[in-house]
Amino acid sequence: MNHLDREVRRIRNLTQNKNKTEEELLIIAKESMERQEILSSLTFCLEDEKKFATELLNKYLEESSLESASEKDTLKHLIDLEVLLERIKKQLNTEYGKVNPTIPIAFIQQVTELTNQIMELKDKLGLSRKQEQQTVLDEWNKLKAKALAYYKESAGCNVVRCPECNKLFMLLKDLKGYSAEKTTWFKKTLLYNKKLFELYDQRRITIEEMAIIFGVSKDYIVHIYENEYKNDKERIS
């Protein structure tokens, strides 16, 4: 028994195919095998992304049939790119949710390039309908709005990261230009000031005052105090 016969036998037992003829079952089996072949040959799709890729594949096959092997390869490439775009969008959303987000320019460039490539492949397959274009455009506009908002909020920030050692430092402006100075407000990427936490440890400043000074929640102060300051204090001792 070959693969096609086994697939026909499998789908024949499904409830939705109860009244299907042998010819109809054969068509369904071929379509099922085609879907499996496309999904199994995707280049970039990880195991936890298979559901998303399957939804994309089913949607596209409902809207257009594949007429050649070339179109099948193009569809594979399209789904691969959409999976990559979704992965980057998730990474961006995670970064935006951090206390001090640092948005790599490369991410924004990748989103732009992937969006353009996806639209080109959809055009090639005849899938570029107005509604789909608007959906991609909406997503892109949302990401662009977030990036612009981040720039406006951080444009005046003088805290920068060294490209060699990846440590944070401050740029202080004088009449002659900029000079690099150490920052006492960060420990790696964490909001941290040793002197303030010493005062807090000595009960000379309250947790409410600490939260106001740092612009964070009281939970954040407790977390940094327990996991960073105390560890530093023990190492010094």
Image (cartoon, grey):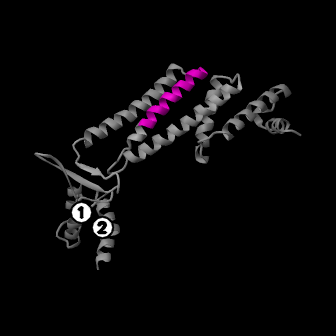
Q: Position of residue 71 (x, y in %)?
A: 66, 25
Q: Which residue is mark 2?
A: 225
Task: Decide: is 100 above or below 152.
Answer: below
Indicate the secondary structure of the residue bearing disc 2.
Answer: helix
- Residue at 24 percent across and 41 percent down: it is 155
Left or right: 209 in relation to 109? left
Instruction: Please say whether residue 164 is one of the residues in the magenta stretch.
Output: no
Magenta region, residue range: 109-127
Left or right: 136 in relation to 198? right
Kind of residue sitting beneath label 2:
Tyr
Task: Judge by depth and name the residue closer to the eye, 163 or 122.
Answer: 163
Residue 215 visible, this orientation = no
Q: Is the residue marked by circle 1 packed among few (<14), some (14-19), or many (20+) residues within 10 Å?
A: some
Residue 193, which numbered label?
A: 1
Observer-side mark, 2 or 1, equals 1
Residue 129 visible, this orientation = yes
Instruction: Please say whether residue 126 is one of the residues in the magenta stretch.
Output: yes
Magenta segment main secondary structure: helix
Quarter occupied by residue 186: bottom left
Indicate the secondary structure of the residue bearing disc 1.
Answer: loop
